[in-house]
Each structure stands twice: as C-alpha cells, then as structure tokens.
Image: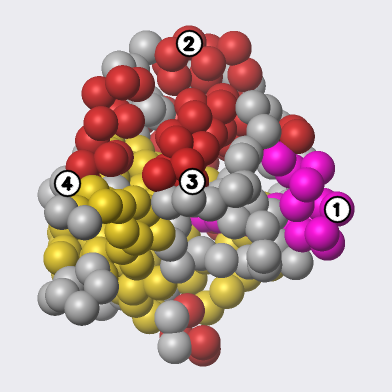
Amino acid sequence: MMDGPLAENDGNAIIASYDWSALSAELDAYGCAVLPNLLDPAACRDLASLYAQEQGFRSRVVMGRHGFGRGEYKYWAYPLPAPVQALRSGLYPRLAVIANRWNQRLGLEVRYPGTHADFLALCHETGQGRPTPLLLQYGPGDYNCLHQDLYGEKVFPLQVAVLLSEPGRDFTGGEFVITEQRPRLQSRAEVVPLRQGDAVIFAVQHRPVAGSRGTYRVTLRHGVSRVRSGHRHTLGIIFHDAL
Ligand SMILES: O=C(O)CCC(=O)C(=O)O
Ligand SMILES: [Fe+2]
C-alpha cells in the first residue's frame, strides 16, 4: 500500500542506527525513552492522511463514548500498512531484550521470543488475533485519559507511539504524559517532549525499579493532555494483539 521511505529494510537500518544501550538505560531509569526522527515528515503526513479513509481499518473508537477522553482512533486491519508493519516487526527484537531483562528482575518466568512473528503466534494461540496498531486523531479540546493498553492475558510490556504532527505548527497543547504509581508513595508524572516523527517507547503496565530492599514494581499509565488548538495525529504500536 505504501512503499515510501520506510520499506522493511530501511526501517531496520534506521532502527539499528539508534544507541540501544543508552535507550535501554533510559527505559530502566525512567520507564520511557525517545527515538528522535523515526519517521520523516513525508511518512508522517502519509500515515496521518490515511485517517480519513474507510479502507484498511477494522474499527473506529470515539473516545468520548467510552469515557476514554475526547478525540478518536482507528485500529488497522491486517495486512498493516508497510511502514507500520516494518516498525512493529523491526522494533520488537530490540524491545524483547529489555522486556526479558525486566521480567528476570521482577522474578517473572515469562520470556518473549526473539521475533515478533513468534510472539504473535503465541497471542493468536490464546485467541488474541486482532491487530492493535492504531491511528489517533485529536482536535481542539481533545485529550486522552491516563490508561493502559491491555487486550487480554498476553501482554508485551513495552509499546511505542509516534507523533505524526508538528507541535507549534499543526497543534498546541496535546503533550504526551506518563504517570508512575509507586507502592505506598505518591505518583510521578513525566511529560515527554516530542517533535513530528519522534517516537516514545514506554512501559505498558509495569516496570522494575531498584529500591533499598530489592527490586519493586511500579504501575504506569499514559495519556495526552488537552489539545489547545489545531489537529494532532499519532501512530500507536502495540505489540500484543487483541481478543
Ligand atoms: O496520542 C498519543 O500520543 C498517545 C496514544 C496512545 O495512547 C497509544 O499510542 O497507545
Ligand atoms: Fe494508549
């Protein structure tokens, strides 16, 4: 459907060009990390423009109808657009290394396979067969309540969101926000500054934190603050499929 700048191989080269040990350290320390310029402006525009099409999506969600916030999103159908498929399968192996290390630190037995195809096969075996990558669209006054993207018992613990619009030009407000709830302590918020094409990697639900008495687990949620003006589009890449 789209063979633009991010065909499968180019995607892998871009992904390989990041300093993954620095990104891993950042994810360990903060639960989120930014990949600057993952998509170029043309790829961002192409993907955002797909929102207006009927074709290629399996469902549309109007957030206000469910108490999720205000704004809307659409889940892609399989086969995913080429750039989305390339990012999902290309980012997964890097993130699986981190996810496995986190599970080891948390004393969890689950380990994630090295390829996304193998992980999806496990999802599909448990009935989680519907694609979860999504395109979100916000207008003035829209926002996304703090949430976790869980779609069944199979959960891949990291996910990615790519900002497709340019802050200050296409929209104002609409900051990406993460909160971290520590056991018996007050929550910590993190606002992630993103430019068009930047991606944020973040923990879906939990992550390990080193404390004075060993490793403990914090609970994360993410959302988007109110868009003050203009329009904002995001590509969401979730690695587990949905029931
Ligand atoms: O629009 C955003 O930046 C956040 C979207 C989101 O909730 C997600 O990608 O899971
Ligand atoms: Fe989300």
Q: Mark 4 to mark 3: distance in Å? A: 28 Å
- Amino acid under label 4? Pro
- Amino acid under label 3? Asn
Q: Is residue 161 left or right of residue 65?
A: left
Regarding mark 3 in the picture, which secondary structure is present there?
helix
Splitting the image into 4 quarters, where does residue 178 fall?
Answer: bottom left
Give yes or no for contact between labels 4 and 1 (Cβ–Cβ under 8 Å): no
Residue in front for this viewpoint, 94 or 186: 186
Residue 163 in view of the camera: no
Q: Would you call the spot at circle 1 few (<14 residues within 10 Å), some (14-19), or many (20 or more)? A: few
Q: Which residue is mark 3?
A: 103
The mark closer to the camera, 4 or 1, is 1
Q: Which residue is mark 4?
A: 193
Q: Would you call the spot at circle 2 few (<14 residues within 10 Å), some (14-19), or many (20 or more)? A: few
Q: Mark 2 to mark 3: distance in Å? A: 28 Å
Splitting the image into 4 quarters, where does residue 242 fall?
Answer: bottom right
Mark 1: C-beta under 8 Å from nearest atom of ligand 1: no
Extent of the magenta region: 119-135
**Relative image position of residue 6 (x, y in whole percent):** 53, 21
The mark closer to the camera, 2 or 1, is 1
User: Counting residues from the N terminus, which is met first, the one under dot 2 or under dot 4?
Assistant: 2
Q: Which residue is mark 1?
A: 125
- Amino acid under label 2? Ala
User: Counting residues from the N terminus, which is met first, the one under dot 2 or under dot 1?
Assistant: 2
Mark 2: C-beta under 8 Å from nearest atom of ligand 1: no
Number of dots carrying numbers: 4
The image's mark for residue 13 is 2
